[in-house]
Image (tube, rainbow, N blue to C red):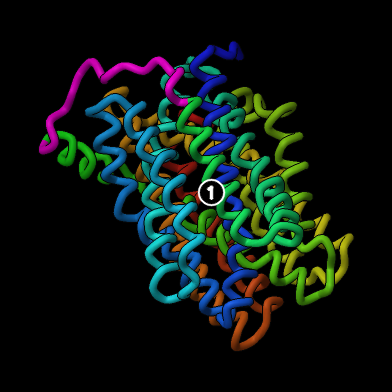
Amino acid sequence: MKLSKNLILITSASFFFFYAYHSYLILPIRIIDLGGGEHDVGLIMSVAGASTLFFTPISGILGDSYNKKYLLFFGALGLSITNFLFIYFNDLYFSYVILRFFQGCSFSFFFVSAGTFVAENIGIKNQAQALGFFGVFTIINHALAPTLSTYIIEHMGYKNFFIVSSVSAFVSFIVLTFIKSKKPKLVQNKKESLRILFETLKDIKIVQIMLVMFLVGGAFVTCLNFAALFASNNLVKPITIFFISYTIMALIMRIFFGWIPDKFGQLKVCFPALMGFGISIGILSFSTSYEMFIISGALFGLSHALVYPSLYSLALSFTSELNKTKTFSLCSLSFTFGGMIFSPLYGYVAEIVSFKVMFLSCSIIVTIGFYFLINKLKSNVKDVI
C-alpha cells in the first residue's frame, strides 16, 4: 500500500484529534470524584453518543456535497474549544452533559469525513488495509491518551489535563490546513442527498452490517467506559492496563497483519474475529488480576483490529462513489447508537448487581447476536465469500 501525502497528513491529524477525544476515557474517574455513581458515568459518557446520533447523518450528507476539509476543520476546532471549557465547569448534570454533547458533535464531523477521505484516497484493493492504518492512530490513543492523562492529572491537576487535550485538538486543526481536498465533482442537492440516504437503508446487506456495528459499538463503548473502574475496584494497577494491552495487540495486528481482510475476504475474517471479540469481554468479566486484564485486553484488541476495517470496507464495497460518506456515516451511527444504549443500561447493571455480571451478560448477548447476523449476511453476500 502506497502512502500518499494526504493519507499521512490525515492520519497525523487524526492522532492529535483522537488523543484529545480519548483522553476523556478517564472522565469516569472525575465523575466519581464529583459524587457521581456508575449510572451517572454511563449516562454522561453516553451523551456524546446521543450527539453523534444526530450529527453523524448530517455529516454524511454534507460530506458528499461539500469539501470534506471544512468538516474536518469544524470537528478539530470544535473539540479544542469544548475541551478547554471543561476548565470552568464541574456540574455533572448541566455543564458536563452539554460539553459531552459538543464533544460528540465534533467527533461526528471529524470521524466520518476523515474515514471517507482515507477510503477515497486509496485503491479499492487496499481499502481495508488503509482504513486499518488510519485506525492505528485511533487505537494508539485508547491507551496513550488515558494513561498520559492520568499522569498529568496526578502530577499537575485537572486544569492542565483540560489544557493539554485542548491544545492537542488545535494541533490537529493546524495539520489539516496542509491537506489538499476538493469539492465533490458531482454535487448532490440536499433533497437528493437525503433521498439517497434513505434508499441506502433499503439495502438489506447495509442494514445487516449496521446491526453488527450496533452490537460492536455497544460492547466496545461499555468496555472502554468501565474497564478502568473495574480494574480500580479490583486494585489492579495501572488501571489503564486493559487499554494498554488492547492497544499493543491491535497495533501489531493493524501494522503487520492489516492485509488479511483484503486477501482472504472481509466477511470470512469477520466471523472468527467477532466471536473472539465477544469472548474477550467474557474473559474480562472474570478478570481479577493483572494477568487476566492483559489476556482479555489482548484478545479484545486482536479481534477489534480485524473487525473494524472489515465491516467498514465491506459496507463501502456495496456503495457507489456518490454515497460512500453516507454509508460510512450510517455504520458510524450504528456503532455510536449501540454505545449510547449499552453504556447507561450496563451502568445500571454494574451499580445494582456487579461489574462481573455486567461484562458477562454483554459478552453473551453480543456473541449470540454476531453469530446469527453474520450467518444472515453470508447468505446475502455469496459473491464476497
Residue drawn at point x = 38 percent, y = 50 percent: 333
Whether residue 369 is in magenta: the answer is no
Residue drawn at point x = 83 percent, y = 73 percent: 235
Give the residues drawn in magenta, as a range: 176-191
Crowding at mark 1 (Cα within 10 Å: few <14, some 14-19, many 20+): many
Question: Which image quadrant: the C terminus?
Answer: top right
Residue farthest to the bottom, as pictured = 352
**Location of residue 199 in the rendering, given as x and y in whole percent from the top left corner:** 21, 41
**Left or right placement of residue 134 versus residue 321 in this view:** right
**Location of residue 9 in the rendering, given as x and y in whole percent from the top left corner:** 53, 21
Res 72 visible: yes
**Left or right placement of residue 385 versus residue 280 in this view:** left
For residue 346, which quarter of the picture?
bottom right
For residue 60, which quarter of the picture?
top left
Where is 65 relative to 239, above or below? above
The residue tagged 1 is 21
Q: Which one is nearer the viewer's eye here, 64 or 128?
A: 64
Residue drawn at point x = 53 percent, y = 33 percent: 171
Question: Which image quadrant: the N terminus?
Answer: top right
How many marks are shown on the rendered structure?
1
**Element type at marker 1?**
helix
Amino acid type at image mark 1: Tyr
Q: Which one is nearer the viewer's eye here, 62 or 188?
A: 62
**Location of residue 276 in the rendering, given as x and y in whole percent from the top left corner:** 69, 52
**Location of residue 142 in the rendering, given as x and y in whole percent from the top left corner:** 65, 48
